[in-house]
Image (cartoon, rainbow, N blue to C red):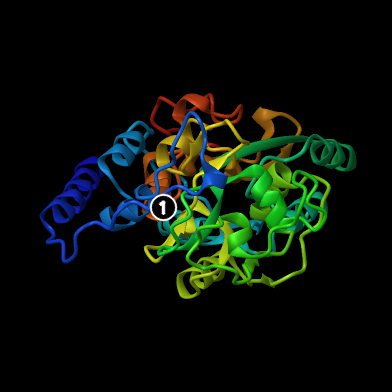
């Protein structure tokens, strides 16, 4: 496994290094006066370059290699495991579930979408074994779940992601601040004096001039939007001018690929070459931070988020054996390899949650009893 990953990463980098460049790099656009910061100039090239190189780099491979090997249990698991929740996590969980089922042919792992909120509701109602929530639970959500069920909440990250602001790849805007995002997306725009609905209101020098800025978003039941609301517009509703609700995060990014004037909100894992993720600043005078493997893992990108599976149990040692083994598979080299292949950011083995701490740093062996 380690040799295969290293070979893939090396071939990807070699192909990029040897590829001919049909056109010279475009000149860097001038930074609009409305975005000039005294201490930092955001980069706009890294996201596109990352997509060209491929997501599975040597840096990613080195992190995946830190995780223990998964060894199948005997006797094999049978039965079913039910996961409900995050749309953003569904492709990732489906891939992991398929790999896990290949180890145990008598086992079925079902993954149903509907949004993070639906996952929490299904877990509270006993309609699933794990809730997929693409953000951290709020203290009130934890209190409500524990109060309603009499069990303790455990959050186990599958991977890390980020809520990102997308524009068309040809849009020269170098970055965006929290207050500007509030002016664009919040109907009451509490952080800025005036709403921003046209490109020249955001950047007087924008080549898009006075064109309206259509915004492509997801329903608020999605963890992607909940994380955005928490950072940009807590307690506020979305504005209604040129607002388009998309069925999924890929549709948001597709719109930004297709329409030069579009802006959208989607996850880091949904990036595409014809759309660009904007560096984000928490406010004037503060640095712009571009979403990347490094800035998401070290939490310096403001809207990073965990992609969590949530389980209820009496205590950490009482998590059902099948559920626990599936979580161990995710926290194995095989599970994190699946995460890396789909472009999300692998978890940090040094930040293992309570449920995983007894197992990291060793091979996943043993024969637990299936309840």
Q: Is residue 221 above or below residue 369?
A: below
> Residue at position x 35%, y 34% from top?
63
Q: Choose between 212 and 162: the one closer to the eye.
A: 212
Whether residue 132 can be seen here: no
Horizontally, residue 184 falls left or right of residue 204, namely right
Give how far across and how far down residue 343 sits, in percent: 41, 52
Horizontally, residue 298 falls left or right of residue 265, namely left
Q: Choose between 105 and 124: the one closer to the eye.
A: 124
Give how far across and how far down residue 47 sits, in percent: 38, 51
How many numbered discs sit on the rendered protein? 1
Q: Quadrant of residue 109?
A: bottom right
Q: Secondary structure at mark 1?
A: loop
Q: Is residue 213 above or below residue 130?
A: below
Q: Quadrant of the N terminus?
A: top left
> Residue at position x 50%, y 47% from top?
175
Q: Which residue is mark 1?
A: 343
> Residue at position x 81%, y 49% from top?
124
């Amino acid at each position: 496994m380690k040799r295969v990953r290293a070979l893939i990463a090396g071939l990807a980098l070699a192909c990029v290094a040897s590829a001919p460049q049909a056109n010279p790099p475009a000149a860097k656009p001038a930074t609009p006066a409305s975005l000039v910061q005294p201490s930092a100039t955001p980069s706009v090239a890294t996201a596109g370059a990352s997509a060209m190189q491929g997501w599975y780099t040597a840096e990613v491979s080195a992190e995946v290699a830190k995780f223990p090997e998964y060894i199948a249990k005997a006797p094999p698991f049978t039965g079913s495991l039910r996961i409900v929740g995050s749309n953003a996590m569904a492709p990732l969980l489906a891939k992991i579930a398929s790999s896990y089922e290949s180890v145990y042919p008598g086992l079925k792992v079902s993954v149903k979408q509907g949004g993070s909120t639906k996952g929490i509701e299904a877990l509270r109602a006993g309609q699933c074994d794990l809730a997929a929530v693409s953000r951290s639970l709020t203290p009130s959500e934890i209190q409500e779940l524990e109060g309603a069920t009499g069990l303790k909440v455990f959050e186990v990250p599958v991977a890390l992601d980020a809520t990102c602001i997308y524009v068309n790849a040809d849009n020269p805007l170098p970055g965006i601040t929290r207050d500007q995002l509030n002016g664009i997306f919040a109907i009451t725009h509490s952080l800025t004096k005036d709403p921003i609905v046209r490109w020249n209101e955001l950047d007087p020098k924008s080549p898009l001039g006075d064109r309206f800025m259509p915004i492509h978003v997801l329903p608020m039941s999605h963890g992607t939007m909940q994380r955005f609301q928490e950072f940009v517009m807590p307690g506020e509703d979305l504005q209604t001018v040129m607002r388009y609700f998309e069925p999924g995060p890929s549709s948001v990014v597709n719109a930004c690929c297709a329409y030069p004037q579009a802006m959208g909100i989607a996850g880091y894992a949904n990036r595409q070459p014809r759309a660009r993720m904007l560096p984000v600043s928490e406010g004037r005078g503060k640095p712009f931070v571009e979403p990347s493997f490094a800035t998401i893992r070290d939490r310096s990108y403001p809207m990073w988020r965990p992609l969590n599976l949530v389980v209820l149990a009496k205590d950490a040692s009482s998590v059902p054996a099948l559920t626990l083994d599936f979580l161990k598979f995710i926290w194995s080299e095989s599970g994190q390899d699946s995460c890396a292949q789909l472009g999300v950011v692998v978890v940090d083995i040094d930040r293992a949650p309570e449920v995983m701490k007894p197992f990291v740093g060793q091979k996943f062996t043993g024969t637990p009893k299936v309840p």
